[in-house]
Image (spheres, helix red, strand yellow):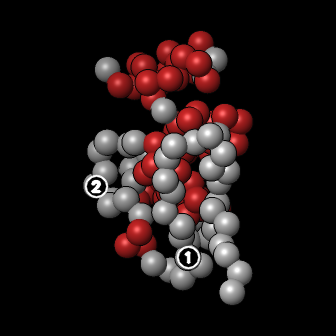
Amino acid sequence: MSQKKPSFSTTNDQVKIVRISREKDLSHLPPPNTMRWVVRRKAQVVSAVRNGLLSFTDACQRYRLSEEEFQSWINLLDHHGVRGLRATRMQEYRPAEERHVVEARAE
């Protein structure tokens, strides 16, 4: 029996990402009313979109995210790995002009 590989590289990352099956099972995803977006939850939603469990638009609607914010998760994950999704380390991964936009939204 072959082993399934996780959707993202786990090298040096200390975040567990739930493996999402190809079945349309949304129960393994964060609930739609999620308010606190920790790294693991962000990575799970990106993985679900990449694996076809949700469309990009459906993910944005389900979690009330702007397309820009969700696209930033995808870009950060691609460029910096799971650690890039940490909001507390935003200054290390995002350009200054992008940080100001995100900080302004939080106010």
Residue at the (31%, 51%) spot, across then down? 34
Can the viewer see residue 45?
no
Q: Position of residue 15 (x, y in %)?
A: 49, 47
- Sequence-wise, the earlier of marks 1 and 2 is 1
Q: Residues within 10 Å of mark 2 (few under 14, many from 20)?
A: few
Picture disc at residue 87: none
Number of numbered discs visible in the structure rendering: 2
Quick one: SS at disc 2?
Answer: loop
Residue at the (38%, 43%) spot, across then down? 37
With respect to residue 103, does 39 lie above or below?
below
In this image, 62 relative to 7: left or right? Answer: left
With respect to residue 47, does 20 lie above or below?
below
| Spatial CA span between label 1 and label 2 | 22 Å
Q: Position of residue 89 (x, y in %)?
A: 50, 23
Looking at the picture, which amino acid does disc 1 mark?
Ser
Q: Residues within 10 Å of mark 1 (few under 14, many from 20)?
A: some
Quick one: SS at disc 1?
Answer: loop
Question: In the rendered image, which residue does mark 2 sit on?
Answer: 33
Residue at the (59%, 18%) spot, across then down? 92
Question: In the rendered image, which residue does mark 1 sit on?
Answer: 21
Foreground residue among 74 and 102: 74
With respect to residue 5, does 76 lie above or below?
above
Residue 98 quadrant: top right
Looking at the picture, which amino acid does disc 2 mark?
Asn
Residue depth check, mark 1 versus mark 2: number of the one nearer the observer = 1
Q: Position of residue 45 (x, y in %)?
A: 50, 56
Residue placed furthest toward the bottom: 1
With respect to residue 92, does 46 lie above or below?
below
Q: Locate the C terminus by quadrant.
A: top left
Foreground residue among 50 and 40: 40
Can the viewer see residue 90?
yes
